Image (tube, grey):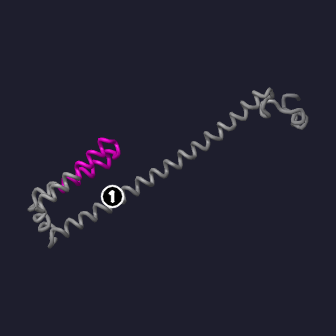
Amino acid sequence: MIIFAGIGLAVLVLVIIISLLLRRQLREKYATLWIIIGLVILILAVFPGLLLWLSDLLGVAVPSNLIFALALVLLIGVALHLSWELSLAEDEVRRVAEDVAIARADLEALTQRVDALTKGSEPAAAAPDAADTAAAPPSLDED
């Protein structure tokens, strides 16, 4: 009975992973790991003697302890990988936010210039006022 439950669990995991992958709710780089895990569960469910042989080979007294140890190592690896991916995503979000802030500042400057041109006057940077001309230092060309 427990063998059928293991087979059912493995098939359920594989169906869920393939379904998420087909609906594009799970990326391929994550699906690969989970498909491998589902296949390992299926192999161990179909051939339970393999787990006994592996636990004897590794010197683990109870085969279920080997499963728990492997699951713990797997979960630590997944948590580490997701932390790494989150760090990369945070760096990318920061970079994109900086790019958007620069683009927004450029857009506001262009908008102010267009507004000044449409009102009939030139922007201050394009045509200096008479007061600015009088206060400007003499250029070297006048000598």
Image spot of residue 138 (x, y percent): 88, 34
Name the outermost residue toward the bottom.
61
- What residue range appears in magenta? 13-41
Image spot of residue 108 (x, y percent): 68, 38
Toward the viewer: 20 or 39?
20
Q: Is residue 82 magenta?
A: no
Is 79 placed above or below 121 here? below
Helix, strand or loop: magenta stretch = helix
What residue is drawn where x is 31% and y is 61%?
75
Toward the viewer: 140 or 8?
8
Amino acid type of disc 1? Answer: Val
Is 4 placed above or below 127 here? below
Residue 90 located left or right of residue 135: left
Image spot of residue 20 (x, y percent): 30, 46
The residue to which callout 1 is attached is 78
Is 139 placed above or below 4 here? above
Toward the viewer: 78 or 142?
78
What residue is drawn where x is 91% and y is 35%?
134
Give SS at disc 1.
Answer: helix
Residue 132, by quadrant, is top right
Q: Which quarter of the rendering shows the C terminus?
A: top right
Q: Which quarter of the rendering shows the N terminus?
A: bottom left
